[in-house]
Image (cartoon, grey):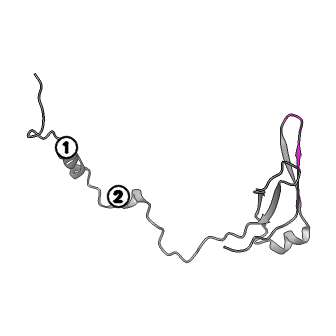
């Protein structure tokens, strides 16, 4: 995990009706410094030790980059199941599995 790059200042404003907004002030110099392809991805998060005041949030640069070396997409469990799936065989197996076993079945008249 990479170290977080904190950026800017946040300030929370709570309205009388309970609504809230978070103001985020960012230095233009930092935005251009961390821009990739013309974009800067930020994460605004609530502090773990929030006190309920106007400084309960902070912002940092989102440095996540997906892995690009993967040559084959991973198979989902559904894909794996479909590969060997034969509907007719599944129907027969299902009928056999749920068929009553005469030796152990009790019949009350």
Q: In this figure, what is the number of numbered marks?
A: 2
> How much space separates mark 1 and mark 2, taking CA atoms?
19 Å
Place of residue 75 in the rendered image (x, y in percent of width and height, measured from the top left): 43, 64
15 falls in the magenta region:
yes
Query: Which residue appears farthest toward the left when viewing the image?
Result: 103
- The C terminus: image quadrant: top left
Decide if residue 1 is on the left or right side of residue 98.
right
Judging depth in this view, the residue of 78 and 25 nearest the camera is 25
Judging depth in this view, the residue of 106 and 12 nearest the camera is 106
Q: Residues within 10 Å of mark 1 (few under 14, many from 20)?
A: few
**Snapshot quadrant of residue 101:** top left
- Res. 81 mark: 2
Place of residue 49 in the rendered image (x, y in percent of width and height, measured from the top left): 78, 56
Residues in magenta, as a range:
9-17
Decide if residue 17 is on the left or right side of residue 43.
right
Place of residue 73 in the rendered image (x, y in percent of width and height, measured from the top left): 48, 68
Q: Which residue is mark 1?
A: 95
Give the prevailing secondary structure in the magenta stretch.
strand
- The N terminus: image quadrant: bottom right
Place of residue 56 in the rendered image (x, y in percent of width and height, measured from the top left): 83, 53
* Residue 84 versus residue 101 in the image, above or below: below
Mark 1 vs 2: CB contact within 8 A: no
Q: Residues within 10 Å of mark 2 (few under 14, many from 20)?
A: few
Please give the name of the residue rendered at 29% of the width and 60% of the height, measured from the top-left corner.
84
């Amino acid at each position: 995990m990479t170290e977080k790059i904190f950026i800017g200042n946040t300030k929370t404003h709570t309205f009388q009706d309970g609504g809230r907004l978070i103001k985020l002030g960012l230095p233009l110099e930092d935005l251009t410094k961390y821009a990739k392809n013309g974009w800067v991805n930020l994460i605004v998060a609530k502090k773990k030790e929030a006190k309920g005041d106007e400084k309960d949030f902070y912002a940092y640069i989102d440095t996540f980059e997906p892995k690009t070396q993967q040559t084959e997409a991973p198979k989902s469990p559904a894909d794996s199941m479909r590969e060997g799936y034969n509907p007719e065989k599944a129907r027969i197996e299902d009928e056999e599995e749920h068929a009553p076993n005469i030796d152990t079945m009790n019949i009350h008249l």
